[in-house]
Amino acid sequence: MKICIGIDASRCRSGGARAHLIGILDNLNINEIAISHVHVWTYESLKKDIPNKPWLTIHVPNCTTENIIYQLWWQLRTLPKRLHQYNCDVLFTADAASICSFSPSVTLSQDLLSFEPGNLYLYRFTKHWYRLIFIYWIQLRSLTKADGNIFLTKYAKKILQKKMSSVNDSIVISHGVDAAFKEYKNKVHSYKFNNKKIECVYISEVELYKNQIEVVKAIYLLRSKGISVNLSLVGGGAGYAKKKLENQIENFDPRSRFVALYPFLNRNELLKKLVDSDIFIFASSCETFGITLLEGMSIGMPIACSNQSSLPETLEDGGVYFNPKDPDSIANALERLINSPKLCKKISTRSNKLAEKYSWKRCSTETFTFIYDVYKRYSIGGK
């Protein structure tokens, strides 16, 4: 029996959430999993990036241009009607911030920021702090009421299920990675940094928990030792976190000699930036998975990585770890790589090998198979 799947992607705003939706749809073979049609509700800019498929219909509701309250109201009152209108058999919520009551449903968790201890404290008593608390309860409701849950890592599953009042059918399905990054895995690195400027790159939107501020100071500490190292911060950003970062750069690099800020880059621009860099830094203290980290692994770069959240689960022994809140720790990790070509080659080879098991084809097949299985169990036994 073939089924029709509805996907609520109206709140898939992060880079990882966007990449996930595009990846699983582009690699879906509906004949392998007995799917007749897929309906996706999303916003205009993401619609443009979703691949055209004969079995795929994309809807852009007016709510996507409104505030979160209006979006949630649309999920509660209008989305169930649209799912019935298009004869959808099951709902896949691609972001857990949903209050749609349709059954059966599967919810994907892609955001740990409201749940991990310590990270909310960074935003205390700000507008964003109240928003994160609100989202905490919305996500918890969505995950608890769903008939099935998908988590990106074992770490995320453990954190969230401790908070849930009941544990539903669940599975861990990690992100995939764009095949274009794997095409660069054979890039030749000498890993010998003597008498050359060392180019470090950190790719992530500017946020307090991403710790770009601490990375800037770490680079300054290395330069204070006479190590010629530059830093590219890629991903853009805005608001309070961006302002704090700009102040930090002004303090340590007022002449813009060694820190450069870049906006969000498209895939080709990002690949060029990675190829032109020597060391990949990932300093986040909260990640459900870390898709940018996986891209660095796929391209075969020596990686200095945060030792917090889910990141050690993804990188395993394929990098050098540091405390992302401690600039001295970050600087020490980078110095280890700079002083050891042998270590660079070892972890680059290892992380690249680990990245081989991640693909959007695998992610897509596992995701839609799980959705289909949840539908079958629901249709046989009810909720």
Image (cartoon, grey):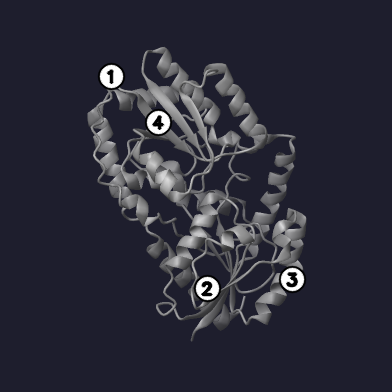
Query: Toward which corner of the image does residue 219 lie, by quadrant?
Result: top left
Residue 339, image x, y percentages: 28, 22
Residue 357, image x, y percentages: 33, 56
Give the mark nearest the N terminus, 2 or 4.
4
Q: How many marks?
A: 4
Give the mark nearest the N terminus, 1 or 4.
1
Which residue sits furthest top? 225
Q: Secondary structure at mark 3?
A: loop
Report the mark closest to the observer, 2 or 1: 1
Residue type pointed to by label 1: Asn
Give residue 78's mark.
Answer: 3
Report the mark closest to the observer, 3 or 2: 3
Bin the neighbour count of mark 3 within 10 Å (Cα to Cα): few under 14, some 14-19, many 20 and up: few
The CA distance from mark 3 to mark 4 is: 47 Å
Res. 59 visible in picture: yes
The CA distance from mark 2 to mark 4 is: 44 Å
Residue 209, image x, y percentages: 57, 36
Give the mark nearest the N terminus, 3 or 2.
3
Q: Secondary structure at mark 2?
A: helix
Bin the neighbour count of mark 4 within 10 Å (Cα to Cα): few under 14, some 14-19, many 20 and up: many
Give residue 195's mark.
Answer: 1
Residue 276, compared with residue 147, is above or below; it is above
Residue bearing mark 4: 200
Residue type pointed to by label 4: Cys
